[in-house]
Image (cartoon, grey):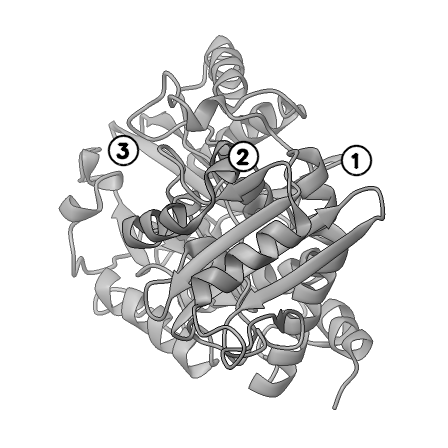
Amino acid sequence: MKSLYIIFFCLAFGLNAQQILPERERAEAVDNILKDRFNNLLPKLMDDTDFDMWILISREYNEDPVLKTMLPATWLNARRRTILVFYRNKEKNTIEKLAVARYNFGENIISAWDKDKEPNQWKRLIEIIEERNPKTIGLNYSESFNICDGIVKTDYETFMNNLPDNYKPRIKSAEKLAISWIETRTELEMIIYNQLVDITHNIIEEAFSEKVITPGITTTTDVEWWMRDKVTALGLETWFHPTVDVQRTAEKLGNHLYAFSNRPEDMIILPGDLLHCDFGITYLRLNTDCQELAYVLKPNESAPPKFLQEALKDGNRVQDIFTDNFKTGNTGNAILAESLSKGKAEGLRPAIYTHPLGTYGHSSGTTLGMWDSQGGVPVNGDYPLQENTVYAIELNTTVTIPEWKRDIRIMLEEAGFWGENGFRYVNGRQTKLLTIPRVKDHQGN
C-alpha cells in the first residue's frame, strides 16, 4: 500500500498526464483527503459560520449533494437512511463525527447507533442532540444555492416532528456552512488539482491535433466523441458532454456559441477554421472545466494568421482585467461590474460568466456573471469571494476580423485559484493557438 505522501508526491512531480492512479490508490487518497478536511478544515468552518452542530440526513440513491462529497471512497451511495452529526466544542477544541447509521461511515466517522439498544433511529438522533445541547443546529436547506438544499421534505418533517420543542428555535439553514465546505480547497486538494488540469490540457492538445483531426473528413461531433472515449480509456469521467465548434470566414456569429441546444453538429472541419472546445473531467472527486482554441493550418501556412493571434491576446487581456479585480470579501457582482467597465473602457467587448469549480463542476460559492446575466446575478452573485477557492475563469471577448468580414468570439476558460497570496491559474492558461497540424521547430519538436 502506498503511503499518502508517495501518492501526492507522484501526483505533484512524478506522473505524466496519462498515468492515472489505480482505483485502490485513488480510494486511499480520497479517504485521507476527507480525514484532513473533517479534522482540520471543518472545525474552522463551523466556527466561522457559528454552528456547533451540523446534521445531514440522506437516503440511499437520494443523497444530499453535500453528504455525497463526504462519502467514503468505497461507498458509491449512502446506505438505507444515513444521518451524519458533526458537533464542534470550541472551548475544548474538539470535533465529533458521528453516524446515526447501522454502519461506520468509512474510517472517518463512527457509527453512534446500536439498533439493539434503541430500535428507533430518530430517537437515537434526539439522544445525541440532547446529550450535547448545541446552541445552533444546521440543516441543509437553501432557496438559492441548489447544492446546499439537500434535506428532502420527508426527512425534514420527520426530524422536526421528533425534535423536542425547546430545540426547534435552534434550527438554522446551514447554507453558509455548506457553501464553505463545498467551495474551500485544502493544500492536498490543490496538489491534485494541478494534475487534473494537466490531464485536461493534454487531452485537448491531442484532440486538437493531426492524430485526431483530418481536415475535410473529421467532424466536430467526431472530436467530441473521441474526447469521451479518451476519458473512458483513461479510467476517468466527464461531468458534461464535450462540445466542439467552428468559426470561419463564411459563417456569421450566432447565439449557438452560447445556447448548446442550437449548436450545429457534425460540421466538417476545414483548413482555415478556428476551433473551440468546452471540456472537463472528474478525477479524485474534483472537476475541471476548460475551453481552448485551435487553428487548422492551410497548406501554405506555417502559423495562425496574425489577426487570430492578436484576437487571442484580447481574450488574455480580458482575463487579466477580470482576475486583477479579485478581492476577498467583494461580491461576484461587484467584481463583474468593475471588470466589464474596465474592459469596455479599453475598447474590448467582453462577456464574463465565471463559476465556482471543485467537487462539482458548477459548484457553490460566488457567481461572477452568467452569459445571459451580464448585469449581475441576484443572491448567488451577491455572495462574497472567499480565499482557498477555485473558479472556472470563463469568459469571452468579441473581436472584429476585417479579413473575414465578420466578428468572432474568443472564448476561454481555465481553472484559477484564489488564496491569501492572490490569484493564480491552477496549471497555466492558453496564450498561443494550438495548430493542426502541429508546427514543429528546427529540432522536430
What is the x, y in percent for residue 28?
A: 67, 79
Residue 170 circle label: 2
Specify the quadrant of the image occupied by residue 50. top right
Mark 2 secondary-structure assignment? helix
Disc 3 packing (10 Å; few <14; some 14–19; many ≥20): some
Disc 2 packing (10 Å; few <14; some 14–19; many ≥20): some
Residue at 45% across, 45% down = 140
Mark 3 secondary-structure assignment? loop
Q: Residue at label 3?
A: 404
Of 190 and 46, the residue lying toward us: 46
Quarter of the image that includes the C terminus: bottom right
User: Mark 1 vs mark 2: which is more N-terminal?
Assistant: 2
The Cα atoms of the two marked residues, 1 and 3, are separated by 42 Å
Kindly indicate whether the residue at mark 3 contacts the one at mark 1 (C-beta within 8 angstroms).
no
Q: Relative to residue 8, is residue 318 drawn left or right? A: left
Residue 421 circle label: 1
Specify the quadrant of the image occupied by residue 114. bottom right
Viewer-side label of 1, 3: 1
What is the x, y in percent for residue 390?
A: 59, 44
Residue at 45% across, 32% down = 311
Residue at 36% across, 21% down = 374
Of 274 and 389, the residue lying toward us: 389
Residue 357 circle label: none
Kindly indicate whether the residue at mark 3 contacts the one at mark 2 (C-beta within 8 angstroms).
no
Q: Relative to residue 248, is residue 184 drawn left or right? A: right
Mark 1 secondary-structure assignment? loop
What is the x, y in percent for residue 59?
A: 36, 66
Q: Relative to residue 178, is residue 14 drawn left or right? A: right
Amino acid on which disc 2 is placed: Arg
Amino acid on which disc 1 is placed: Asn
